[in-house]
Amino acid sequence: MSKILRVNMTDRTVQYEDVPEKYRFLGGRGLTSSIVCDEVDPTCHPLGPNNKLVFAPGIITGTNAPTSGRVSVGAKSPLTGGIKESNAGTGWPQSVAKLGIKAIIVEGYPKDGGWWGLHITKDGATFFPADEYAGRSLYEVYPLLFERFGKKVDICSIGVAGEMKMAMAGICFNDAQGRPSRYSGRGGLGAVMGSKGLKFIIVNPEGGPGVHIANPDLFEQGRKKMLEALRQHDITKPKGGLNTYGTAILVNILNEAGGYPTRNFREGRFEGAAATSGEAIFETNKKRLGKELYNHGCHPGCTIQCSNTYYDEQGNEIVSCVEYESTWALGANCGIDNLDAIGKLIWLCNDIGIDTIETGGALAVAMDAGLLPFGDWQGSIRLVDEEIRKGTPLGRILGNGAAFTGQAFGWHRVPGCKGQNMPAYEPRAVKGIGVTYATSTMGADHTAGYTIAPEILSVGGKADPMDIKKADLSRNFQVTTAFIDSSGHCLFCAFAFLDIPSGFEGLVEECAGVLGANWTTDDVARIGREIMEKELAFNRAAGFTKAHDRVPEFMKYEPLPPHNVVWDVPDEEMDAVWW
Amino acid sequence: MSKILRVNMTDRTVQYEDVPEKYRFLGGRGLTSSIVCDEVDPTCHPLGPNNKLVFAPGIITGTNAPTSGRVSVGAKSPLTGGIKESNAGTGWPQSVAKLGIKAIIVEGYPKDGGWWGLHITKDGATFFPADEYAGRSLYEVYPLLFERFGKKVDICSIGVAGEMKMAMAGICFNDAQGRPSRYSGRGGLGAVMGSKGLKFIIVNPEGGPGVHIANPDLFEQGRKKMLEALRQHDITKPKGGLNTYGTAILVNILNEAGGYPTRNFREGRFEGAAATSGEAIFETNKKRLGKELYNHGCHPGCTIQCSNTYYDEQGNEIVSCVEYESTWALGANCGIDNLDAIGKLIWLCNDIGIDTIETGGALAVAMDAGLLPFGDWQGSIRLVDEEIRKGTPLGRILGNGAAFTGQAFGWHRVPGCKGQNMPAYEPRAVKGIGVTYATSTMGADHTAGYTIAPEILSVGGKADPMDIKKADLSRNFQVTTAFIDSSGHCLFCAFAFLDIPSGFEGLVEECAGVLGANWTTDDVARIGREIMEKELAFNRAAGFTKAHDRVPEFMKYEPLPPHNVVWDVPDEEMDAVWW
């Protein structure tokens, strides 16, 4: 049976524990949030000895279910002050799951200085001194680790930002090619890992028992339905939208809708959108490489394969990959229309270990406050590479995120909720996503309840983006998402199964098959709701109220071009989501 | 009849308004908190266009009642995110009151840059450009203003920290000798004034109608009782404790009690206490000047006269004055035992326009986090004079206060409540003041409910400092204080009237006499409670919950020498104060 691995950083001991019955049917977000709720005092200091960092592969992660290499990382967030589940796609949780490990709980507080790595194999978990890797580039360190621990390992780590406990430090995982480029980026969980003195968790799956599948027939039935749905849908099929243009296919779509936040949420349309879009990435690569390049998966077994690699004029890799959120955060939101510079900035974020969304947000707020002009990509590169990386005082300001940067410079135009900067959808132009930003347990997070699907993409039905009645829509998405984030499937699978009912059945059957649970699609809302209720209870105990379920004040009085709309969703509508 | 002066910084207009009936019996804190509650959205951004800054002299301020030159300044605080009343002793509110002005409300938001001053005389209020004074030392600017506007004026201003909208920027008033040294220091209200583009409010009382006293006989009866109490009590009488040693008389007392926070609240006793005490100030002055120097008042008409002036070896003034909180914050809390250096640091805080308590807190947290060693007074002077004053990135970190500094450096030992650093009493060693820190509407604030009086000083009864049942004591003090802060009397008058009942009668009779109110001492608790309820409602609407009525987590698990006590007051005891 699978185990929970408990890692104590006070005395550097590990312990394999049986999985309590109450966690039996949980995985991914459902499990990390349950453990955080059960074991972490909501009023503790996020960087103090009583916070815990929890890793959990999804329920089906480690099986051959398609596009299911997702990990949830949970803790009390130093960025939001609330509960956090930050999700990444990588082979790492597949390896963890194959070792029969259902969750890793990192707790305690180092009595002395120094950095440590944890090496997990079928034979157990051992610590190794990691000081020699501290303070260095992750692109430099990852190859050294693969050399030392073997090509079969997967690596979880923090970069220098996590070492410095910056609130926008993410937790880095390798992609399928071993790059340090897949991130549980949001919410500053890298700082929590840094506060524990833990630099790496390196996992070798060889010889592990693999994921126990209680009902293989049911699982296989579900897997086929999911696979079929993913292969059918225009967005998720091979050479479909995501495989061709990556997530940055959304740039032109959102820009057209007037909901593409530009220059720190001053406008909803960016004159440089086309030049920084997924289409531009595809066409530029084609021109530079002399051939059409389709995307690859971030982990083994992904059939959507949305990860691009972006090349320079000499045909050398600039970065992999340029996500929609990243090209926006470091592009439009900063007024930067130079795709090569954006690629370089993303590479720097990966190298240092910081969230691209929050980094772009911090730069944009700094620009808005007058520190440097919008569009200054040279200045932005300097700030990231020289200030944040080195932890200068200015780097520590930026590295603690957009809201922190705003306060440092006495600037009130900070487009965040619960301390986390908004991602690449303008709430004034797309009201439902604003309701999600405001009411999510995670702070402003598009992945918490992606109402963009019906509001903009006509996926899973249609909703008028300007309609202010969005409480039910947002709640339904948030609840369903809590289940998907627990399953281990990438959220992008939802593009397919929101439109193809058999795919949704497949999702539930895969999970039920692994767990031996007696679930149908009717159970999804109940299970998702239970997870949300735990997270909401944690946040309320941490001090969150209705007053925190709000978008920033300036959006209520600043009309957003081109539609010249303000945030006009009544407070009551936001309160109708959870209160 | 008195008026409310409304100052709009959007279009730079002023308006004299009749006082609404609902504000008739209010003054000082009762009035500022009521106006803030009535006119400011609790969820607004403190530095955005919808916050308002309200100034109100106390009820009896401007009369000849002794020790009554107090001003309340109110707003939503950029430091705490809650309501703030920050109180100072100065002639400025006496001049305001003499012009028949009951409150000044500063609202709106500048459309263009630049700094403005407001000049108020009996003929009205006019703006003048103040750019020439921006960016400069307040000790340099104040004499220029007295030269330009006449010796009779009183000056309210912000320093460079307020211009930069730092969250520990205070609002500065002149003392009786014209120094820029009396502060509404706490809560960052200087940043709110800075966000409005307002640099000065200069008031000339000449020819004003004076304060209308509805019942002169009652007022005079009360005034005599108060005066008699102040003259009798050992703490407040001429050549008594405060007049001889200043507020820093408390240093040795708190140190002896093991409740004198040392090195960022790591210890409760400081080896340098005696060298930085009120007695040391008195004796050093005596040695350096060759005579005994008794203290002076911070405003005309003060009979307590607790403000010292501290001199260097050549007999030149270092600073006036060295308060208990300042010698502690920049002394023991930073491990600094050099009184001349402490004096210099206080002077710098005055000059720049920052709160000495929060400045010392920020330095102490930075020291604890490893930025510089405890005791490094040269480094501290450099940080204040070169970093904070110039608004370098490090200066902006420190200038935003101790909690902000802690986050910047990823440091969890931040001894504050609701974002405001604790003052000079250790809650682990004196439980009642901890309950006040945790439950005050103002963040950690000793003046909000000074239970030190019975817990340490045996004034107003006796209470065991280690007794954890302190909800009733703290609430009673908080409620009574809300009344005192409205009266216009200095809180130090309470030393006398807590022990001398006729003084307490005098307090009420003075206020009732001015207002024509039908009050007795029985009304004090009701009136104080009404003020508290307004402030509590504001904070709850701003998002404060029970979870915010807590001391920092580390105090629960770090025993404090010399008594080796942790914070052991149950949460229920804190909740019993207001919930």
Image: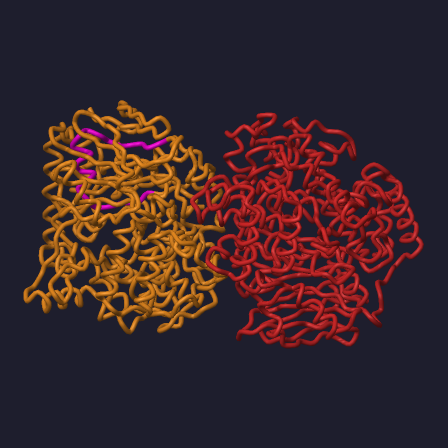
Chain colours: A red, B orange
Give whichever of A521, A264 is nearer the camera: A264
Q: Could you tell me if residue A76 is visible in this image?
A: no
Task: Tell whether B558 sits left or right of A428.
Answer: left
- Among all residues in the image, which is located at the extreme left? B291
Task: Tell whether B111 sits left or right of A265.
Answer: left
Task: Tell whether A456 sits left or right of B199.
Answer: right
| Count of all numbered marks drawn on residues in the image | 0
Residue B283 occupies quadrant: bottom left
- On whether residue B99 falls in the magenta region, the answer is yes
Quadrant where the C terminus of chain A is found in the figure:
top right
Quadrant where the N terminus of chain A is found in the figure:
bottom right
What's the residue at 30%, 46% (across, down)? Answer: B135
Position in image of residue A289 (x %, y %): 79, 50
- Among all residues in the image, which is located at the extreme front? A314
Residue B417 occupies quadrant: bottom left
The segment highlighted magenta reads B85-107
Whether residue A300 is situated above or below residue A198 in the rendered picture: above
Whether residue A255 is situated above or below residue B457 in the rendered picture: above
Give whichever of A380, B189 is nearer the camera: A380
Give whichever of A329, B132 is nearer the camera: B132
Position in image of residue A431 (x %, y %): 63, 32
Give whichever of B381, B125 is nearer the camera: B381
Whether residue B172 is situated above or below residue A352 in the rendered picture: above
Position in image of residue B449 (x %, y %): 31, 51
- On whether residue B294 falls in the magenta region, the answer is no
What's the residue at 83%, 71% (across, down)? Answer: A206
Position in image of residue A144 (x %, y %): 70, 71
Whether residue A149 is situated above or below residue A403 in the rendered picture: below
Q: Could you tell me if residue A1 is visible in this image?
A: yes
